[in-house]
Image (tube, rainbow, N blue to C red):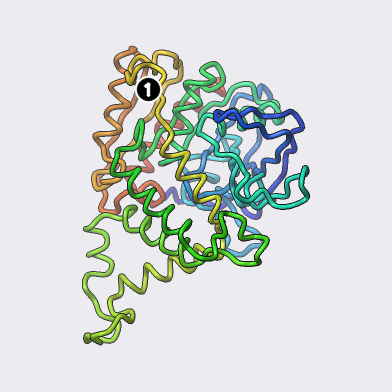
Amino acid sequence: MNAKARSVGDVTPLTAHFNQALVLSSGAELPEFDLVYETYGTLNTNRSNAILICHALSGTHHVAGTYGGDARTAGWWNNMVGPGKPVDTNRFFVVGVNNLGGCNGSTGPASINARTGKPYGASFPFVTVEDWVHAQARLADHLNIDCFAAVMGGSLGAMQALQWALTYPARLRHAVVIAAAPKLSAQNIGFNEVARQAITTDPDFHGGDYYAHGVIPFHGLRLARMLGHITYLSDDAMMEKFGRELLAGKHKFSLEVEFEIESYLRYQGDKFTERFDANTYLIMTKALDYFDPAASSAGNLSAAMAKTKAATLVVSFTTDWRFSPARSKEIVKSLLDNALPVTYAEIESTQGHDAFLMENEHYFSVVRTYLNRVAQEVNA
């Protein structure tokens, strides 16, 4: 990390309310909605230095900084965003937003439906990556940002960056696409379905309307997170961190927690149930499944990407078996087929899919160097 890098400090979430109805890809309509967001840095006089950060499945608007000076509340990409960091808030105005369907303030299943006076619950409509991008464009209008210097994200956030380039090609100069795929494989959809089944078969799910019963589908959501967490790590990372270590140093010959990895997964599952909504998890995983920009071009990704204008940075990680480097190279090829400017980096890492969240000298150097060029371009 740059020796001069530091945190953006304490931050405050903001809420934008939109009265104009949003028609979703499913045909459903949200008559009004809220988006919760945070900003870091200063928008320059010609409003050209804004970067939108899109979050992944379990992320939020809280990208960087802290609440109340408590280091434990640091944003989920606090190592990436801040003064002197790869996304340098001395040079960029950074916007983080909680997507529709979320559970951190933006309108979602736990929000009160003004028409009924009750939480949406199971009646909250399914959303797509394209729907999120349309909602984010409304937020950009609210902030008087006509064109982003870059739209950036990892995993599901990277899919949003790609969708921005397709849906609003004149409203971003660069797309930063990290640990992504142009669509999910059957295996990935399968993992998501098992996670959803864990939630929907929990006796406390109540068809998605568990709010009225004063319960949450704890066991199902916990299992879903445990399964997901396994897929985010590489085998090497899990062996390096946990190996086959036993908590008590010997076998108990029982179904109690014996291995360190079992304890870790249960801890992660328990912690997740305290901060995340089960209905949101269902909606987010479905949005992942639905994402397929090539579908409108008879499955031809190169034909689909012909609509884009942005220059693109694509980053993959060697041990990411969920969104492997081969999937990133599909994106790169589709851009090259259209003679679009693209930079590609494959980063050596043992950390699997979660590597996009971790500090890595080579990874951070690539992002920093690329965004330094973007800063020079937009501030010229």
The residue at the point 53 percent across, 52 percent down is 6
Q: Amino acid at mark 1?
A: Ala
The residue at the point 30 percent across, 80 percent down is 255
Name the quadrant of the C terminus.
top right
Q: Quadrant of residue 363?
A: top left
Vertical side of 84 occupied by 339: above or below: above
Residue 91 rendering spot, x and y as whole percentages: 56, 34
Structural crowding at the residue carrying mark 1, measured as other residues with C-alpha within 10 Å and reported as few (<14), some (14–19) or many (≥20): some
Q: Quadrant of residue 21?
A: top right
User: Is residue 321 toward the left or the right of residue 132 in the image?
Assistant: left
Q: Which residue is mark 1?
A: 294
Residue 372 rendering spot, x and y as whole percentages: 46, 31
Residue 44 rendering spot, x and y as whole percentages: 65, 28
Return the residue nearer the eye: 201 or 353: 201
Residue 68 rendering spot, x and y as whole percentages: 67, 62
The residue at the point 66 percent across, 29 percent down is 22
